[in-house]
Amino acid sequence: MKKIASLHLEYLLNKMNIFVFSICTLIFSIAISSNLIDVYSSTSYKNKSEIYLEGSLILFEIFSVILSCFIFSFNFLKEKDEYRYLCVKKEDEKKLFLIKKIIVSLMFLYFFELINLMVLLLMGYLGVYRFCISSIYHYKIFFVLLQVIYYGFLSMFLVKLCNNLFTIMLPMLGKFMSLYLVDSKNEIAKLITFLFPSSANGDLSNVFFICIEVIVLFYIVIYLDVTKEY
Amino acid sequence: MREIKLINIKKKYNKRIILNNINYTFKEGNIYQIVGSNGCGKTTLLKVILGYIKHGGFVENNFDDYSYIPDKINFPSFLKVGNYIKIIGYTKGLDEETIKSKSDKLLNLYNMNNAINYKLNQLSKGMKQKVLLICGFLSDVDLYIFDEALSGLDKEMQKQFMNYIKKLKIEKKTIIYTTHYEKYFRGLYDVKITIKDGIINEKNSKSTS
């Protein structure tokens, strides 16, 4: 287990992943700083921590989803998976190889998410007077960290199906539409916000549905990987 | 005797027939050379043998273990050659001592001793091919399958590769390879298989010489 996992990790630590993460973190930091400036110009009745966290968590959510879609699509393209020829020989090993790669990719993604979260919190502590996080924001952070699995698996599913990096446009566009339509009450908007969850509609029933969707996507991806040619 | 039996193998890409009802048996201890023009189905045939792609018909393979060396793979950006070979060795189930003794020999054979601390992304195409060959030869198996093993290698290294294949031949290993460099393999193979229009033609080297 450990050896294959370390091989996956070495492959994940490629120039492209590092580059995309660095760019994402840089833009995220700039956006958070800009949000911090807005906090002080705001005349809202809410306290400064809340204003800062509401704006920053939306940014954290968007950047987390972009990063997740990228990591779970770029690294699961057919040509990025060719090293399996050197270590996979039997049908069972094929499954294990992918499961381990998914686990390592998740850990890799969460490491980057953690760095972004640290940036968010550090800027909050440094820039907002009497900065504190209420429990509702703990839940929102948890929800973001859960939904990145869903968006990652959705991207991985599309890549396994089409072997094309452009397929990540679908979950990303879905995510943006879902954020835009969150207050709409019509049926289509409800369907979009259900298929592409966001923290704005992240109640407990949605957590349940995301878990179900993640499990279903996981099994479909395993099935596609084992039955599809490589 | 171990063998790989291909029974009514059919393979199409879109509507193009690549392998058309192929029946063939690869027997233990022989060296098979597969040749044919670009896109004729050489790599497809290897992947059918290994079960990497879906196809019509059946493959009966009773070899326990094999080593497959594809024509190319992607390499990690920042890993060093020595560490990569070590990790691949571990994933093949080898212990540290075996990996060290085997990789030292192979690195020496392919003139890669000095490159052990090079990062993989700094290597030329030929050097990457050598790393791939070293990884393929790490484990001692009875069946070796190579896809265009000579591509990117200079003449000296091609010679070294041939010598290694000759050594494996003496050890009665089964080897299947595809190539465009037929002249380099002259006298090495037992059976030459030509793929054309989805059909394979076998030529036994002993019967032709």
Image (cartoon, rainbow, N blue to C red):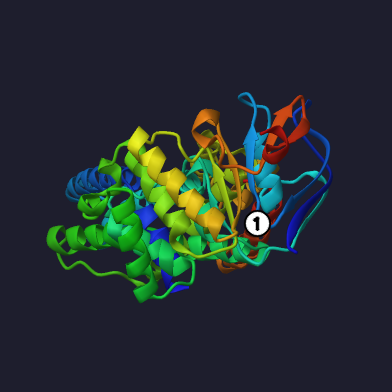
Of residues A44 and A73, the one nearer the viewer is A73
Q: Position of residue A28 (x, y in %)?
A: 27, 47
Crowdedness of circle 1 by 10 Å Cα count: few (<14), some, many (20+)? many
Q: Chain of mark 1?
A: B
Q: Is residue B200 above or below residue B118?
A: above
Q: Secondary structure at mark 1?
A: loop
Q: Position of residue B11 (x, y in %)?
A: 77, 37
Q: Is residue A127 above or below residue B95?
A: above
**Residue extending furthest front?**
B209
Of residues B166 and A60, the one nearer the viewer is B166
**Count of labels in the image:** 1
Q: Is residue B189 left or right of residue A35?
A: right
Q: Quadrant of residue B27?
A: bottom right
Q: Is residue A11 left or right of residue B60?
A: left
Residue A45 in view (yes/no):
no
User: Which kind of residue does numbered mark 1 sit on?
Assistant: Gly
Of residues B91 and B61, the one nearer the viewer is B61
Q: Residue at x 31, y 47 (%)?
A: B77
Q: Position of residue B3 (x, y in %)?
A: 74, 58
Of residues A13 and B13, the one nearer the viewer is B13
Residue B100 in view (yes/no):
yes
Q: Is residue B4 left or right of residue B161?
A: right
Q: Is residue A106 left or right of residue A196?
A: left
What residue would you read off at disc 1? B29
Q: Position of residue B37 (x, y in %)?
A: 63, 24
Q: Residue at x 19, y 62 (%)?
A: A122
